[in-house]
Amino acid sequence: MTLIEALAREHPGITVLPASTRTAAYLHDAGTRAAAAGHDGPTVALPTTPHEVQALVRTAASLGVQVVPRGAGTGLSGGASARPDQLVISTERLRRIVEVAPLDELAVVEPGVLNADLNTHLAPYGLFYAPDPASHEISTLGGNIATNAGGLRCAKYGVTRESVLALDVVLADGSLISVGQRSVKGVTGLDLVSLFVGSEGVLGIVVGATLRLHPVPVARRTLTAFFPSTPDGARALAAITATPVRPAIVEFLDEPTLRDIDRASGSDLRTRGASLVLVEIDGYGIDEQERDLTAALVAVGGTVRAETAEDAQRLWELRRSGRGFGQGVPRWLVGEDIAVPRSALPDVYAYFSEIEARYGVDVSAVAHAGDGNLHPVVSRLISPGADPAVLPDDLIDAATDLVRFALSRGGTVSGEHGIGSTKLDWAGLELGERTVQAQRAIKHALDPDDLLNPGKAIPRADAYASAP
Amino acid sequence: MTLIEALAREHPGITVLPASTRTAAYLHDAGTRAAAAGHDGPTVALPTTPHEVQALVRTAASLGVQVVPRGAGTGLSGGASARPDQLVISTERLRRIVEVAPLDELAVVEPGVLNADLNTHLAPYGLFYAPDPASHEISTLGGNIATNAGGLRCAKYGVTRESVLALDVVLADGSLISVGQRSVKGVTGLDLVSLFVGSEGVLGIVVGATLRLHPVPVARRTLTAFFPSTPDGARALAAITATPVRPAIVEFLDEPTLRDIDRASGSDLRTRGASLVLVEIDGYGIDEQERDLTAALVAVGGTVRAETAEDAQRLWELRRSGRGFGQGVPRWLVGEDIAVPRSALPDVYAYFSEIEARYGVDVSAVAHAGDGNLHPVVSRLISPGADPAVLPDDLIDAATDLVRFALSRGGTVSGEHGIGSTKLDWAGLELGERTVQAQRAIKHALDPDDLLNPGKAIPRADAYASAP
């Protein structure tokens, strides 16, 4: 019996899209979308309940068909990309906000709820869900959990892991387990909640989540600090850490990023300075916070301003909406998601020039500077007559060079996007052989037949670095 | 070759205490210390480097000897208790503070450093390590990590897991892996850091840790709110959540606890009220925070006062130093560590009366009310002629009844002390059968011969509740 026959016979009530060119979009996620149109996609099931997810996994397992869990497909590392012989189980129709418990500051949701929709729903309660990936208007909470998504605010409020209290998870054998609890604390047995968060669908499929909420702060204020150069701005970031102010957001935009945004959006950021530290402070004592932070940033050469609410909103929209790549002259691009200890940020920006000179590329980055996470883009104009879809090897070498630099400073290949299918080799540079063995052993313990999102997130055994 | 012969031959430089009555203290931890004196204890090794820990584990593994990792032995759930045929590897002599990196707000430590000693070391930097179990002056950071220790401040600053960036861990085969990174964020592969935190020594032995620090807040202030009864105080806690103030600490002391403290310490808390909400606020805008919190607590009937620095210090000492049990008439005691969603705290305190009536016991509790974690003590006067060391069955039944109540409200058996060896049956009430299987599979994946702290932390297969 084929997969599609089995699904039709055993689960007539579940919407299933047969493998065809109509499902080509499910071959890829937002980071690997390039050349899908016209190809045959995978079989796609659209369950509406946790029980249906269990049934689908059991049917797939009985046929030995591999399963790729998927949220909204907004991931940037190929974590949700699927082959035509695989079954995609999309959780986008599990989209109920089941409960909001204000006194316990928690919400119970299904995985298909969009991040921004939860916050819209929470507004009347005076509460918010903190993790805010730039994709928050289009990404699902289930996808956020699968990637342990970060965002802008995690400098103060933590990443997704810090906001997940409990999970309902369908395992590779179709069983459903509930892990965690509704209390803030809990240490009964191993911490499976944290293990599932960020596991990119290789250990189980999240079908329900109990999320921690925070009260909307009594005040929020946006400060801009412009600096005369990228190095000046990068060095100035340490001045924030030297104060007792811990902003909700600290973003750093280098000179090429300001130019790109201006070109794409008609803004005039570059006329105000050559790099920008964009800060949101919140909470009690907002005036004292502003005073201390302004003094610190002025002392290191910044031109500091508290923005009006209207200007602030515009600035955050500019920051979140990306840099306008894809406009103008076409370029080859490699995007990264490295993170380093904050003290290494100036060195990373200084290293861009070395890479530019060595490989003949352009490098720029916006950074979640509050937590040392950068999104460098290594790019080059596409050569006349060259295939735009085929990245030159030395462009990838340049990007790998930058990854190695981050690792040499105690950083990581991926701060928030995950490893997926596109960063496995880089992950092998970070993780020692024995660590990869341990990760594979845990994967095997929960999914012995390698049915759930095989080949993602954990490097291949031959891709590891030598353990030091 | 016996264990002690092998250790002497292979590791002549490592201090090893042979199994004898001299090592009887290592049979137990602070929660199970009762009747050790005079019995033969386990073999105890006191390595001074990670390499020595590796060597010891390899030797033990080659002889099939089980290993019990141990910090200062201050645990309360029997996690570090050992049998005479086991090898205790104590990390108390790995006690270097390797590095403090102020700009990265991190410290690198060995596991034997005492929690309080790290904070003493950090004071000149204007930084602090947030997790503060009541044992902070005598417990090691390695033990804190093994139990994912909580404390008073975790309402605002999170539990130990939120303060661990990276770990060096010796696995059951003696290999050493480094997991995590020095940046705040990192999602490369599975989150092994979180998995090791709180794993109570069953997956590996922590031999190094990179810890996240916080800036000392610009201000700290202690507020007391006394209420005319325990139920009044318990109900009042919700008023704090309804404000935007998120105190660093919210403790709740019921009437019996106030009486016990007064009797043990000569204080007069009970004359000020019948229950106490003890709060520390910190950070910017301390006056506005005090104003909003005071208004909220007065509105629900509290007698609220901002304490002087001197009185505040005295109050926190009284709170941390325990309740004076063990003084006066001897009692049978069962201590608990349940946690519930905060909204359920009034119901838990109300349920104490039911349990007292049903089982003929006394129940009182101090609560880390900010995160719903309670430490109830179920007690009864020891019957004339009875063996003080043998707890009556119905006392344990009473305690189990309370555990079931917490679980019925979405809570947990253990908020911060861990399961160890004493709470395995209760853990079985919390975790479903398939969850226990998954935990055991992960344990088996990393320790196939069950050499590391066997029988701890994860319930036996026959102890689980039916999965719902």
Image (spheres, coloured by chain):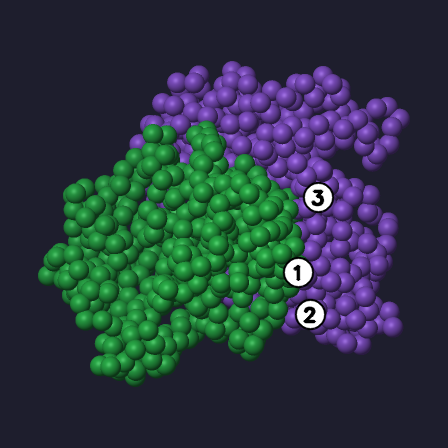
Chain colours: A purple, B green
In the displayed structure, B52 sits above or below A455; it is above
Q: Is residue B423 above or below residue A424?
A: below
User: In whole angstroms, how far apart are the C-alphas of marks 1 and 3?
Assistant: 18 Å
Q: Is residue A282 visible?
A: no
In which quarter of the view is residue B81 placed? bottom left
Residue at screen point 24% across, 65% down: B326
Question: Mark 2 highlights which residue?
Answer: A174
Q: Can you identify the residue that label 1 sits on?
A: B448
Q: Residue most toward the bottom?
A: B358
**On what subunit does the disc labeled 2 rest?**
A
The reply to whether discs 3 and 2 touch (Cβ–Cβ < 8 Å) is no
Which image quadrant for residue A110? bottom right
The amino acid type of the residue labelled 3 equals Glu
Residue depicted at 36% across the width and 75% down the height:
B399
Q: Chain of mark 1?
A: B
- 10 Å neighbourhood of mark 1: few (<14), some, or many (≥20)? few
Q: What crowding class fits label 3: few (fewer than 14 Cα within 10 Å), some (14-19), or many (20 or more)?
A: many
Q: Is residue A351 left or right of residue B162?
A: right
Residue B409: x, y in percent? 42, 71
Q: CA distance from mark 3 to mark 2?
A: 31 Å
- Identify the element where label 2 is drawn: loop
- Mark 3 chain: A
Residue B440, horizontal then vertical, whole percent = 61, 65
- Tell me whether the residue at label 2 lies in contact with that at label 1, contact meaning CB atoms closer than 8 angstroms: no
Query: Amino acid type of disc 2?
Result: Gly
Q: Is residue B190 left or right of residue B46?
A: right
Q: Nearer the viewer, residue B10 or A424?
A: B10
Of residue A194 and residue A29, the one placed in the foreground of this image is A194
Query: Which quarter of the figure has residue A89?
Result: bottom right
Looking at the picture, does residue B33 appear above or below residue A6?
above
Between tags 1 and 3, which lies in front?
1
Quarter of the picture containing the N terminus of chain B is: bottom right
